[in-house]
Amino acid sequence: MVATNVKSETMTLMEKRTALEAQMNSIIDRLCQPGGPGLSDNLVDSEGFPRSDIDIPVVRAERHRLSELRNDHREITEKIDQNLQILHSARLASRSSPPKESVQGNNEESSNQNSPVVSAVPSASSYNVVLRDSPSAMDVDVIASIPFVMVDEIADASPAAEDGLQLGDQIVKFGNVEAGENLLQRLASEAQTNQGCAIPVVVLRQGAPINLAVTPRTWQGRGLLGYVCHLPYQ
């Protein structure tokens, strides 16, 4: 229940952060349009007089609002990071718990075929996961819904861009890499090992899980994928 509540709160915070980012980008676009004052340019001319080509009170108000939004964004991001650490801990604790043995019915007249069996496999909710649709219930792909890395930059015409990865995507699973130590090294190794082969990737995009297939390959730019990421959740 605690993990469920924390996850719900985290998703709500992510939505709020996305809304803040939209507001900040809107202000930045207005301030940085051609001929605009930018984020920090002087509001006076070379002679020390107020610039006549801009609305100074409006510019000051927008810069002040942008500063407020950045502070709110930082606070929400810190709270999201804290919650993700809690979810990581809960997930690891669940995985380290010993499995329960199967329990069969006590009716001696029942044969083994008819005896009810309680599966020892934990439920999806106990692992805080998202289940993808699958042709067979026995082949359900269980995806841990906890991101561990965020995409910061994507080069144009790069393999990452062509295969559907987007700026701001939060990677939940990259091939065999999910979470743990030395993530950047493991991500690079996974790409090198699977050069020319499609790697299944799961990302959170605006709070929703997205399944992609990314193929590391040589191209005109650097690396095999052409994206830059950082670890905000570690």
Image: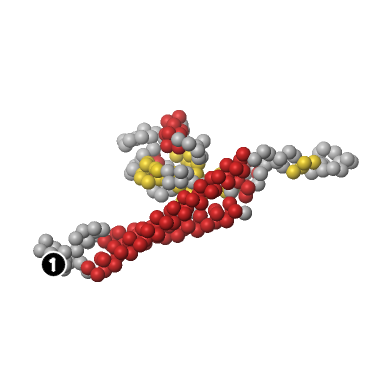
| Residue drawn at 19 percent across, 63 percent down | 43
All told, the count of numbered labels is 1
Corner quadrant of residue 107: top right
Q: Residues within 10 Å of mark 1 (few under 14, many from 20)?
A: few
Picture quadrant where residue 229 is located: top left
On the rendered structure, is 149 left or right of 124?
A: left
Q: Height in image: 163 above or below 13?
A: above
Residue at image mark 1? 49
The amino acid on which the numbered mark 1 sits, given as a three-letter code, is Phe
Where in the figure is residue 18, as x and y percent of width and height? 42, 57
* Vertical relation: 106 (above or below) 33: above
User: Going 64% across and 40% down the picture, which residue do you hit?
Assistant: 97
Task: Between residue 168 and residue 2, name the one nearer to us.
Answer: 2
Q: Percent x, y for residue 12?
A: 50, 58
Q: Residue at x 30, y 64 (%)?
A: 64
- Give the left or right position of residue 147, taking residue 117 as reference: left
Q: Where residue 171 sits: x, y (%)?
A: 46, 44
Residue 104 locus on image (x, y percent): 80, 41
Label 1 sits on a secondary structure element that is: loop
